[in-house]
Image (spheres, rainbow, N blue to C red):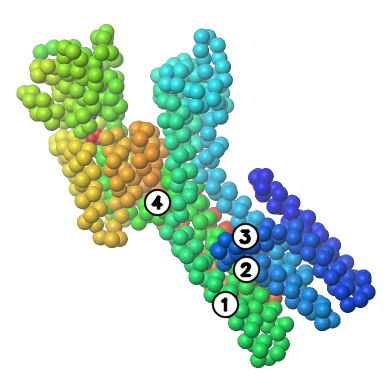
Amino acid sequence: MKLEKEQKIEITKIIISVILFLGIFITDKIIHLESVFDGDLGFLFPFFLYLICYLIVGYEVVFKAFKNLFSGKMLDETFLMTLATFGAFGLAIYKGINNEQIEGFDEACMVMILYMIGEFFQDYAVERSKKSISGLLELKPMFAWKKEDGKIKKVSLEEIKVGDILVVNPGEKIPVDGIITQGETQIDTRAITGESMPKEVSFNDRITSGCVNLTTQFEMEATKKYDDSTISKIIKLMEEGADKKSKAENFISKFARIYTPIVVILAVIIMLIPSLITKDSGTWIYRGLSFLVVSCPCALVISVPLSFFVGLGKASKCGILIKNSTYLEQIEKANIFVFDKTGTLTKGNLVVKDIFPKENEEEILKSAYVAEKFSSHPIALSIKKYIEENIKIEENIDNFTLTNVSGFGVIAKNKVDTIYSGNEKLMKKANITFKKQEGTVVYVAKNEKYLGCIVLEDEIRQESKETISLLHAENCKTYMLTGDSEFVASQVATNLGVSEYKSCLLPQEKVEFVETLIKNKERSDIVCFVGDGINDAPVLTRADVGVSMGGIGSDIAIEASDMVLMNDDLLGLINAKQIGKKTKSIVKQNVVFAILVKLAILILSVLGLTNMYLAIFGDVGVSILTILNATRISNTKLVKKDKKSKG
Ligand code: ADP
Ligand code: MG
């Protein structure tokens, strides 16, 4: 078990006080500490000894209870513990003064020790699952090696600029996103994608920050600053999400706010009323105090957030990053799924299938290259790749100003020429007569003169169909939205069997569509949008749950989304639902179990059938059982890509 520094201090305090406690307790049983010093105040000697032991483990609890008391939020568990243990001390002193057999010093101590042991385990469990949520800090690269004028020097991540050449040694983390410029190696992408097989990469391959270089030194060119790199985005996403509590967690804090005062009032009633009637105030004060101790809703308070942490951790282990527990609850309930087509349902790896030049093939390719040079749209990337492989480019393109007209294409302008590269809409907008082709088509024109078109073909993702049918099996509705032509859209939609589709949409129209869906939905409906973030980041933020593709997606996608599928595997949606479902059922079990046991012990304590030891054992026991139960979430069964499912 690996412990944080604070946890080590905690456990040391617990061990010291347990040893001290046993020492005092055994000596007391043998020689009766209260008779070591003669006189009426002899009982103060064991009191001081136990008090030391008590304060070693418990001073922080007492301190916090008093601090809360003065800041007005007094009714939490530290308050209950302090009240109950002070009560036990008080009771023992009262008995001592009246020369009765004293009991209660040891109980006060033991209660505090047991409570702290319980706290320690909760802390440990929470810390551990928090850490497993993508191992945030371990993920973060610490520095980079920059190559400059033939020398290699160590630089901080913030100093890295786009275009810098960096050297990554075996065992080191890739500091920023980039492209390999020299060498080949295997990288471990597990932290980012959850994929456990190492990935072979070589010259010109894109690599993601946060992955670990496994075998050989290589050189890379930084294509992003650290702040814009995947790893930094992920860390920010997770940190931002970490503070927000889910509905179930909020329910618990609200519950505790009503529950605690009720318990305190009940305890006072138990102490006062029977005492007045039976005149046996000692017994009833003791029962009231045990009632307070047992009433701590620790197990309840801890098990709910813990279950969610385990759920989020499980998801991140298989490459599904979920911003916080709210979205784990939401994705479980989501029943309307809207997909972007290019890059989401399809691979976005388009291949040039046909070129229809009006006159000259080279002219259309060169012009398209000028326009698409700096676009990151999947269409642009594919065209660029094709052109670079097939013709020699020498055109000076630097003095072109490029305008991305999202949903239309690109316009490139310099003093002499204007080049248009985009879909039908762009041609119509520019008043250019063109010859229509079926498919995913990019029409190219220069100065109002139509040059021809490039027809591209995309490949549907292997798991798209399965994902859609599994969603339908769960009674979800599916939509596909695309800016692509009706022809391609209907082909893909029919192939996948989505419930409905819309084609030829502008990015703004996608937003409007999702907004209408949200406006007209039933209250229980939850709308999830899945996209690659290229041209659809606004929709990602608008949907109840925005899911983006981490691998192919754009940088803004991760920021705009609530959930990221790091390995671009759409089945992650199904798996996230599965994990959400399991988490929900475990939370329910834990809450019901904790409340029932609590009630039983509360009743027993009022009837005097239990003492403080048993009461606190009950509480620690329930906490530990609910913690163990929560770990079952990590056994959730998942759907895998290569295995064909029955559905
Ligand atoms: P989708 O992801 O559904 O394709 P987009 O809004 O990203 O939707 O794109 C809509 C359409 O706009 C594309 O199908 C394409 O016709 C055109 N388009 C967008 N960007 C470019 C580009 N860089 N070059 C050519 N056409 C583009
Ligand atoms: Mg898109």
From the image, tell me which residue sits under label 1: 265
Outermost residue toward the bottom in this view: 277
Q: How far, Cα to Cα, is label 4 from label 1?
A: 37 Å
Q: How far, Cα to Cα, is label 4 from label 3?
A: 34 Å
Quadrant for residue 571, please give it: top left
* Label 3: which secondary element: helix
Label 1 with label 2: CB-CB less than 8 Å:
no
From the image, tell me which residue sits under label 3: 67
First along the sequence among labels 4 and 2 = 2
Above or below for 518 versus 625: above
Above or below for 203 versus 535: above
Front residue of 535/97: it is 97
Residue at 57% x, 52% y is 126
**Coordinates of residue 320 in the picture (x, y in percent):** 42, 43
Quadrant for residue 422, please give it: top left
Mark 3 residue crowding within 10 angstroms, few (<14) / some (14–19) / many (20+): some
Front residue of 485/84: it is 84
Residue at 24% x, 21% y is 402
User: Of circles 4 and 2, which is in front?
Assistant: 2
Q: How far, Cα to Cα, is label 1 from label 2?
A: 12 Å
From the image, tell me which residue sits under label 4: 327
Residue 424 visible: no
Label 4 with label 2: CB-CB less than 8 Å:
no
From the image, tell me which residue sits under label 2: 80
Residue 511 visible: yes
Mark 1 residue crowding within 10 angstroms, few (<14) / some (14–19) / many (20+): few
